[in-house]
Image (tube, grey):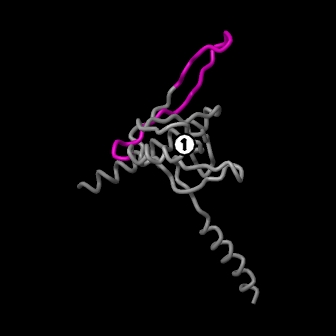
């Protein structure tokens, strides 16, 4: 009888833990209300990225030199038309980059983005390096999988 009382909470914990929704890193529509809610399917995930680069930009503001780190990337050519159409439908709304189920940034879309280029910006340089390394790792794995499919 004691084991039944122990088993029920364990089973419930297992069921609840397995039903949580995980969102892979990528660009998702984001609503303002309730606070920064991720809505809908991703416009692009890291598997849709053609390239990503960790870059540093230096500029002067009021006589002070400011250094900013960011991730620059581009969507694969075969995904750019759907990216452009999706960003056009989001004009006036927010599009967020999601990493480990957290919104890293979510700017408001002002125009159709046909080039497929994007930047991921955060004041947390350690976080940016982690995101970059994660994207690079996932990109290598997906290209190995696609090469393996050709063999």
Q: Give the mark count.
A: 1
Q: Is residue 4 magenta?
A: no
Residue 127 in which image quadrant:
top right
Residue 52 in which image quadrant:
top left
Q: Quadrant of the C terminus?
A: bottom left
Q: How many residues crowd around disc 1 within 10 Å: few (fewer than 14), some, or many (20 or more)?
A: some
Residue drawn at x 60%, y 68% is: 19
Q: Residue furthest bottom?
A: 1
Residue drawn at x 67%, y 9% is: 63
**Residue 14 or residue 115, whichever sits in front:** 115
The percent coordinates of residue 148 (x first, y second) are 29, 54
State the extent of the magenta-drawn residues as a range.
56-79
**Residue 80 or residue 139, whichever sits in front:** 80
Q: Main secondary structure of the magenta part?
A: strand
Q: Is residue 66 magenta?
A: yes
Residue drawn at x 37%, y 43% is: 76
The percent coordinates of residue 18 (x first, y second) are 60, 68
From this view, report whether residue 38 is shown above or below residue 80: below
Q: Viewed as shown, does residue 5 lie left or right of 141?
A: right
Which residue has dot 1 on it?
91
From this view, report whether residue 18 is shown above or below residue 82: below
From this view, report whether residue 19 is shown above or below residue 49: below
């Amino acid at each position: 009888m004691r084991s039944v009382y122990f088993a029920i909470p364990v089973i419930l914990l297992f069921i609840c833990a397995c039903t949580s929704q995980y969102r892979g890193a990528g660009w998702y529509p984001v609503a303002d209300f309730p606070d920064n809610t991720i809505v809908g399917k991703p416009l692009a995930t890291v598997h849709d990225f053609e390239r990503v680069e960790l870059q540093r930009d230096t500029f002067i503001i009021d006589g002070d030199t400011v250094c900013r780190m960011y991730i620059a990337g581009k969507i694969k050519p075969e995904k750019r038309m759907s990216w452009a159409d999706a960003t056009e439908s989001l004009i006036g709304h927010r599009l967020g980059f999601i990493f480990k189920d957290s919104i890293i940034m979510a700017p408001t879309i002002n125009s159709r983005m046909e080039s497929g280029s994007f930047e991921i910006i955060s004041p947390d340089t350690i976080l940016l390096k982690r995101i970059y390394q994660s994207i690079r790792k996932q990109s290598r794995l997906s290209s190995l999988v696609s090469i393996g499919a050709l063999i």
